[in-house]
């Protein structure tokens, strides 16, 4: 009896641990209802409700590790609704930022590939799915969007936003 309990507990614990490890994988935190009133001003702008956008930009992601388009131009102050579609068979994401921010975040993702995160400047998109993100580009300059899933950014999955 005592041996059976130990075996059952051992097997049960193993299943829990392996299940948790498998579940973590490429999964990112499920997006909560966004509270745009608390959106933080970033060097490249601020998150806004996509419904309030004055312009829509469609961005497609593919397993070729490329974004289409690879470059977009907006005017300073524009509020943009990004509609991000993953045409691939693996998870992709679109993360807005400065080049330094994206490089730092990419390094963290390489060291912690199963890390869950969700910010208003990120759109995590499962294969054959679409997500949206709203952004007001409040400063002129050149900014970027990249897929920071380990290996994707390094393979060239990066785009440019030119704010005039």
Image (cartoon, rainbow, N blue to C red):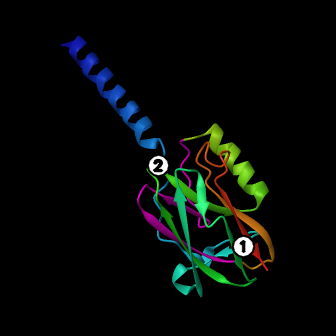
Judging depth in this view, the residue of 105 and 40 nearest the camera is 105
Where residue 129 sits in the image (x, y, percent)? Answer: 42, 62
Q: Residue at x 24, y 19 (%)?
A: 5
**Figure check: 104 above or below 135:** above
User: What secondary structure is found at the residue carrying circle 1?
Assistant: loop
Question: Residue 99 occupies which quadrant of the picture?
Answer: bottom right
Where residue 120 sits in the image (x, y, percent)? Answer: 59, 67
Left or right of 37? Residue 28 is: left
Judging depth in this view, the residue of 47 and 40 nearest the camera is 47
Q: Earlier in the sequence, mark 2 or mark 1?
A: 1
Q: Residue at x 48, y 51 (%)?
A: 91
Question: Residue 37 occupies which quadrant of the picture?
Answer: bottom right
Q: Is residue 113 magenta?
A: no
Where residue 157 sits in the image (x, y, percent)? Answer: 64, 53
User: What secondary structure is found at the residue carrying circle 2?
Assistant: loop
- Callout 2 crowding tier (Cα within 10 Å): few <14, some 14–19, many ≥20: few
| Marks 2 & 1, CB-CB < 8 Å contact | no
- Callout 1 crowding tier (Cα within 10 Å): few <14, some 14–19, many ≥20: few
**CA separation, marks 2 and 1?**
31 Å
**Figure check: 141 above or below 29:** below
Left or right of 17? Residue 152 is: right
Q: Which residue is mark 1?
A: 41
Q: Which residue is mark 2?
A: 90
Q: Quadrant of the C terminus?
A: bottom right
Residue range corresponding to the magenta coloring: 114-136
Q: Residue at x 28, y 17 (%)?
A: 6
């Amino acid at each position: 009896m005592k041996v059976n309990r130990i075996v059952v507990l051992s097997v049960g614990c193993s299943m829990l641990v392996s299940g948790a490890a498998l579940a973590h994988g490429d999964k990112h935190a499920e997006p909560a209802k966004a509270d745009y009133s608390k959106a933080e001003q970033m060097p490249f702008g601020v998150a806004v409700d996509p419904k309030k956008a004055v312009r829509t930009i469609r961005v497609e992601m593919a397993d070729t590790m490329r974004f289409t388009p690879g470059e977009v131009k907006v005017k300073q102050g524009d509020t943009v609704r990004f509609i991000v579609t993953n045409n691939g068979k693996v998870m992709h994401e679109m993360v807005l930022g400065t080049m330094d921010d994206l490089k730092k975040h990419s390094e963290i993702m390489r060291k912690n590939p199963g890390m869950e995160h969700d910010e208003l400047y990120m759109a995590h998109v499962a294969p054959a799915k679409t997500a949206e993100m709203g952004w007001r580009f409040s400063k002129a300059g050149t900014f970027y969007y990249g897929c920071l899933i380990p290996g994707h950014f390094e393979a060239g999955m990066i785009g440019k936003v030119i704010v005039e």
